[in-house]
Amino acid sequence: MSSAAGRIEVLPELVKNQIAAGEVIERPASAVKELLENALDAGARHVEVDLALGGVSLVRVRDDGIGMGARDLELAFASHATSKLREVSDLDHIATLGFRGEALASIGAVARVRILSRERGAAFGAEVRDEGGAISPVREAGSAEGTTVEVRDLFFNTPHGGASSSPRPRSWAAVWT
Ligand SMILES: Nc1ncnc2c1ncn2[C@@H]1O[C@H](COP(=O)(O)OP(=O)(O)OP(=O)(O)O)[C@@H](O)[C@H]1O
Ligand SMILES: [Mg+2]
């Protein structure tokens, strides 16, 4: 019955996330969109966006939403990890902009990302990093209430440098158009 090694293999988690990033994070504007959606889903009333080099070098989105505690930060970069969906029937009445639990995992696979967050009413904030799929432990960190997600060097961890190898002015325009 069993033969020598077959041809089919399950892809490593990082490769899955890099492929997902290729599908969802086409350019810096896509990362801005995902992070803004997360801020809105978190009930933010004020959102601040900072960009450097059209988002390739830095996208920072700061919100005053519900924030994340340490337990949530531990899972924030895990793929298929979401607070917005529990079972498939929830899809019939989904009220959030995201639900796949894939955006942060994908962005973290191809960039250097830091999430700094403090839950509403919590005494302390915490932070976690994902640098090209290498996820740090969560540690305590000073933070305002709400969440800041900082994405640096977008596409550094993709073959051929991904969109960062395309002309930067185009990337810049893509954020604004
Ligand atoms: N700005 C934020 N404020 C509070 N919680 C957040 C924020 N961003 C992300 N989260 C939490 O992290 C989880 C994962 O975010 P992610 O964007 O990866 O997935 P999602 O929004 O659930 O689905 P999708 O992949 O469709 O965007 C969210 O479900 C949410 O619980
Ligand atoms: Mg999302």
Image: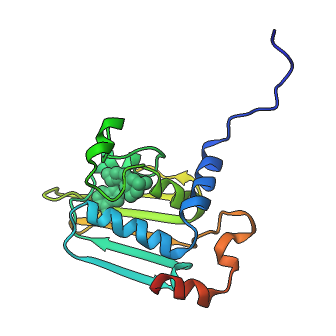
Q: Quadrant of the N terminus?
A: top right
- Asked whether, in this view, residue 119 is left or right of residue 107, the answer is left
The residue under the point 54% across, 61% down is 24
Q: Residue furthest right?
A: 4
| Residue 21: quarter of image | bottom right
Q: Is residue 107 visible?
A: yes
The residue under the point 70% across, 78% down is 165
Q: Residue furthest top?
A: 1
The residue under the point 37% across, 50% down is 99
Q: Position of residue 38 (x, y in %)?
A: 33, 62
> Can you tell me which quadrant of the image ligand 2 is in?
bottom left
Q: Position of residue 103 (x, y in %)?
A: 46, 57
Q: Residue furthest front?
A: 92
**126 and 88: which one is in front?**
88
- Asked whether, in this view, residue 64 is left or right of residue 17, the answer is left
**141 and 37: which one is in front?**
37
Q: Is residue 139 visible?
A: no
Q: How many marks?
A: 0
Q: Residue furthest left?
A: 121
Q: Position of residue 59 (x, y in %)?
A: 46, 76
**174 and 143: which one is in front?**
174
**Vertical position of residue 31 compared to residue 3: above or below:** below
The residue under the point 27% across, 60% down is 41
Which colour scheme appears in the figure? rainbow
- Asked whether, in this view, residue 67 is left or right of residue 6, the answer is left
Q: Position of residue 4 (x, y in %)?
A: 86, 20
**Vertical position of residue 170 compared to residue 89: above or below:** below
**Vertical position of residue 15 compared to residue 151: above or below:** above
